[in-house]
Amino acid sequence: MARDIAIAVSGVSKTFKLPHERYSSLKQNALHIFTKRRYSQFKAVEDINFEVRRGEFFGIVGRNGCGKSTLLKMLAGIYVPTKGSVRINGSLSPFIELGVGFNPELTARDNVFLNGAILGLNRKEIAAKFDDIIGFAELEEFVDQKLKNFSSGMQVRLAFSIAIQAQSEILLVDEVLAVGDSSFQKKCFDVFRRLKKKGTTIVFVTHDMANVQEFCDRVLVMSEGKKLALTGPDQASDLYNRLNAQNDLDEMEQLNERNRWGTERVKVRTVEFLDGTGKPNRILTTGEPMTLRVELEPTKLDVPLLVGLALYQADGTHVAGPNSDGVKIQSGERFIEFTVDKLPLTEGTYTATVALFDKKGAETFDYIDKGFSFAVGGLKRTFGNMALFGEWRTKK
Amino acid sequence: MLNMPFLGNTPKVELNTNRNYWSMVRELAVTDFKLKYQGSVFGYLWSLMKPLAIFGVLYLVFSVFVRIGSDIPNYPVYLLLGIVLWNYFAESTNNAMRSIVDKGDLIRKVYFPRIVILFSNSLSALITLVLNLLIIVVFMLVARIFPTPLEILGFLVLTAELYLLSLGISLFLAALYVKFRDFAYIWEVALQLLFYASAIIFPLNIVPHRFLQVLTLSPITQIIQDTRKLLISPATITTFDSVHSVLRFVPYAIPILLVVLGYWYFERAASHFAEDV
């Protein structure tokens, strides 16, 4: 293993055997000794390869249940891979969670020594750093209080303070920053910056793309136990957002019981969203062209149509209603398209209502209420409900 | 690249660290001991009360009512010593059996050699043993028994044997209990049987000859009888008195064998504790 490589993961898989019935007693085992035990195999992590360089800030992102925690546990040595190998070069923080082994019945002082020992510090080392630990956690007045009387924020502060004293060359961090107030979070990030400067290798598992973009050098994106990509932070967070959007759409499609009515003399067959390249894509991008294409069932009726279109945000806010004034369908035509050059919608998921009326709006041919969903991947530094494509200028 | 001590047969993970786990063993043991008597007024005194209470009852029954013990010189110390050694064995194996499951939270979230838990468990049992031995010292002084340094050395060797015996059994029980919770009940019954098979209450000269050999081949009987002979009464019947073939060495070999096999079995199971507990 090359000297500049801190972690080498090659061909790592982890399969959990989930017995259909779990026998945790001998009798159950004896009774079923002749029946073959049925297992369903759950592949939590499949054939992952990557190397983390020394001093690198390496991110792992992915949706819940994508296997990133299992992978982290294999890096920490808690799980043994089913296949493949993990090689670690340098001292490693062996834990994936803060405050492991904290006991509520012990005082903060005792817990510092206990937790420190679990993290591999000896009594002398902890004693030498004790004041720093308590000082960083801002718990000077509570040293001899039992931990059960601490708020959860205080416990996390104490845990984090001990963890950073473990001073390993490779640090594994799993979503620790979700807790604690904002001023303490800032302190944590300062510590990360300092560690990064000192050349500590950090493996960071998170959901927060802002953190990814700020800290990570490279990011592993995982999906369903597999490696989706190993890229820079910008591409990775883009990919992650798309991954999330796709999943949100799948969920929305299931939830949306299509609400549809009308005389059906003219009928919608499909509705598609096309991206800037003209291909059907339900994940669109702010500022890029977008086309909504309605395909009609063949009809002999030859009347001008009023096409109603309404777009809603995930929370139900009606964001746009670009209705057509009257579209005449010539014989042989079956598509109606609505095109936007620069999509002004910002990041999020949307649903669309598509409706066909006669020109006066007296007859409803087909009305599909919130029947179609799509997602928009945002631009960097674009917030709010809509994107304004204005220009910035300076003048004397 | 160094391999971790205790890492055993998990070649798939190579960690280039050489951490000293002694402080973890000690912290866990001390915590255990602290928590055990937390919130009780008499605290550590309770760990002395238990053997004394058992002693009181058994002494009353077997020395005053049934009078088995009246043949034995210094029967009170003789009895108490047996109880204290037995208590150490029973408690350390019983606690060790549950220790891996009890520390499940730790195991799922931190890597450390799992055997650390067993060492810390045996250490906290040793603390209790040392405290209990203080009562023995008091009893011996009262009975005007003063062991020579050589006898004390012999006693330490026998205690080491007892430690190995308990550890060997603990290694098996702890790993088995993770998969089969039945062992809680199995071991409870086994301990009951062993208690009466280990001649803790009665002198071995009331045991028919054909049973005598079987009883004294148990290492726990051997340890208790050897200790009594060494410290209290030279008339105590030991394994060497009752078994005359090479078999007399068997009880001395069993603890070592159990530790070796137990270590192998435990380490084989340990790599999957994080998933199984």
Image: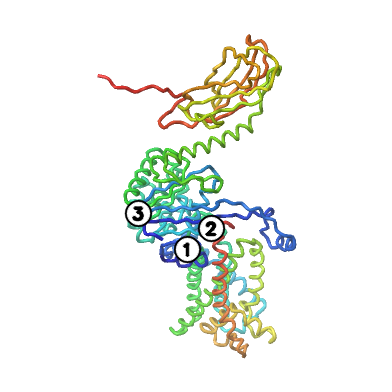
* The N terminus of chain A, quarter of image: bottom left
Residue sitting at x 64%, y 62%: B180
| Residue, far left | A396
Task: Check if mark 2's residue and mark 1's residue have beta carbons within 8 Å.
Answer: no
Query: Where does the image place residue B143, in percent across and percent down from the top left?
Result: 51, 80
Residue with the mark numbered 3: A130
Mark 1 Cα-neighbour bin, 10 Å: few <14, some 14–19, many ≥20? many
Q: Nearer the viewer, residue B233 or B6?
A: B6
**Mark earlier in primary sequence (3, 2):** 2
Is A305 left, or right, of A195 in this rendering? right
Task: Name the subunit of mark 3.
Answer: A
Residue with the mark numbered 1: B29
Residue with the mark numbered 2: A81
The quadrant where residue B26 appears: bottom left
Query: Do marks 1 and 3 both belong to one polypeptide chain?
Result: no
**Picture colour scheme:** rainbow
Residue B68 can be seen, yes or no? yes
| Residue, far front | A332
Residue type (three-letter) at the residue carrying disc 3: Phe
> Alpha-carbon distance for marks 3 and 2?
36 Å
